[in-house]
Image (tube, coloured by chain):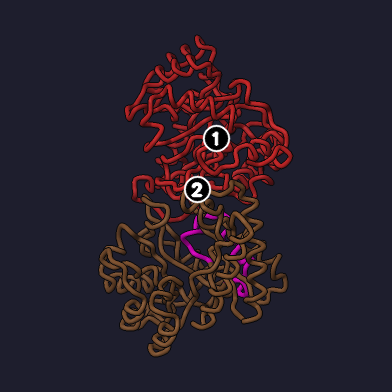
Chain colours: A brown, B red
Amino acid sequence: MASKAEVGAVRDFSADHRWLSINTATLRKQQGAEVPLDRIIDQCAAHGIGAISPWRDQVAAVGLGRVAKQLKAHGIGLSGYCRGGFFPAPDLSGLRAALDDNRRAIDEAKTLDAPCLVLVVGALPGALEGKAAYKNLARARAEVHDGIAESLRYAREVGMPLAIEPLHPMQAADRACINTLEQALDLCDELDPQRTGALGVAVDVYHVWWDPKLKQQIARAGRDRLLAYHVCDWLTPTRDLLSDRGMMGDGIVELRKIRAWMEGAGFDGFSEVEIFSQLDWWQRPGEETLATCIERHRSCV
Amino acid sequence: MASKAEVGAVRDFSADHRWLSINTATLRKQQGAEVPLDRIIDQCAAHGIGAISPWRDQVAAVGLGRVAKQLKAHGIGLSGYCRGGFFPAPDLSGLRAALDDNRRAIDEAKTLDAPCLVLVVGALPGALEGKAAYKNLARARAEVHDGIAESLRYAREVGMPLAIEPLHPMQAADRACINTLEQALDLCDELDPQRTGALGVAVDVYHVWWDPKLKQQIARAGRDRLLAYHVCDWLTPTRDLLSDRGMMGDGIVELRKIRAWMEGAGFDGFSEVEIFSQLDWWQRPGEETLATCIERHRSCV
């Protein structure tokens, strides 16, 4: 454990969990079975959770209006909305469909009063299904650039900040071809040079903990660009590229140190727990997962 | 497939395989069983392979002198020797043991007349066994810095270039905490500012294909620093973080484009095939794997 002097001052999370947000993917499966979002929201409310970040498919399954009403009734806010993105496509109609879909995602985020729409930008189209339509990362990155530029126009109109989430390089082929914070911030600087707050980043420790330039780039991002902060842990060994994330404290990520960098740069928002864990947490009761999130938020994050 | 104009001119590999090297990990297992290095060398000779890159444990099992003699008899050279590194340790005696071991690796590389010793630098000590002795990436990186600096002294004396291999960020916790070409070259610039050729990098497409700064950093490296070039392919999906590498052409890596960047920067050495493939190629007959390496070298690399 790093000493306080090493990591710098951070907000004290030990006394309560007011700054804890639950990304609802963490509770998507409980004891191996899919759980609907309305049930997850009730569980969060019962544990005094103040904010969540839900996924579009979870919201759609219950109904947007119903979710909005339920959240309001419980006094639960959002720390983000998951997710827009997946811009690259093999042809023009695919590119247009992606833009339309992002517009709908922005509208939904607005309805739910989210502080930002998180963007998982996409990569080689078709790669997620094992059949890349083309092998050209530069082309995918250009399509992402254009897709964000176009979506940003509408997002600005309605006042919904877009948060680019750089994904771990192990997901560069199939999920997101923006893979470092530096790359994401270069794009922010290009598309929003005035730092209006309309475009920024979601920093997920799982994706960026390894980056030798992480501290430097978090400082570069600054308060205007740091729109969301996601936590979990990196397990050794990691048995799956997507869904073997660890509970905070169970892996090797220097959580306190990274949060100190975030807060040093001006971030003062929620710490959002996002754990995909087919092999472990998704097999446990949701109450156990939630209680552990709260305990680790207070002791490890 | 990228057009010739896009990728720039490259050496023509289509007519023969004189520039093909086989990293002997590719043939370590055949039809599921371990195969000794002397047998692998005979197989390579039978296929007209001009260079290999053997692993220390494979050499030790057969005997260093015997391997040297066998290679000479076949007229097979080395494109590199795998591997030194793993510098970080929880205590001083561990750090010293790593330095001693790297000295032995340098001596072996010299005996085998290798053009360079490849360094997989290590990361959090113990993480490979699932129990990190400490969680401090900056400390591991400092220990790597010091370990390379110390080993470089001896390597210079005996004239054995050290090639730092940046590993994919998914291996940053347990195998190597140098994870981008930029980071590796920063270290080279610091420890060998005169670009003497004593310190450089091994560029393995599997580890670096995703990097948005790859082209720029290969150009920065230049001929003096580009000591080795490894190829294979990135499969979608990738089912294992270590041993699910693909045969060239079976994945999404833009092999021709990256080789053009390498050659544009002055690299004119071997293209070394290194495929860890527990689920596929290691289950096949070695002759099939070798024949496929040759065919893909001519058609895809």
Q: What residue is shown at x 51% (from left), y 57% (from top)?
A: A175
Question: Identity of the amino acid at label 2?
Answer: Lys
Alpha carbons under labels 2 and 1: distance apart? 21 Å
> Which quadrant, please, contains the C terminus of chain B?
top right
> What residue would you read off at disc 2?
A131
Res A58 visible:
yes
- Residue B286 image position (x, y, % from top left): 41, 24
Report helix, strand or loop for mark 2.
loop
Can residue B194 be seen in this snapshot? Answer: no
Where in the figure is residue A13, as x and y percent of width and height?
A: 41, 76
Q: Residues within 10 Å of mark 2 (few under 14, many from 20)?
A: some
On the image, the x and y values in percent for residue A22 come to 40, 74
Read off the magenta span.
Answer: A203-226
Q: Is residue A263 left or right of residue A14?
A: right
In-front residue for pair B228/A152: A152
Report the magenta stretch's main SS. helix
Residue neighbourhood size for the residue with mark 1, other residues' Cα within 10 Å, grouped as few (<14), some (14–19), many (≥20): many
Q: Residue at x 63, y 56 (%)?
A: A141
Looking at the image, residue A121 sits to the left or right of residue B12; the answer is left
Query: Dot 1 lies on which element?
Result: strand
For badge 1, the amino acid type reads Val
Residue at numbered disc 1: B231
Residue A267 position, x and y percent, is 55, 74
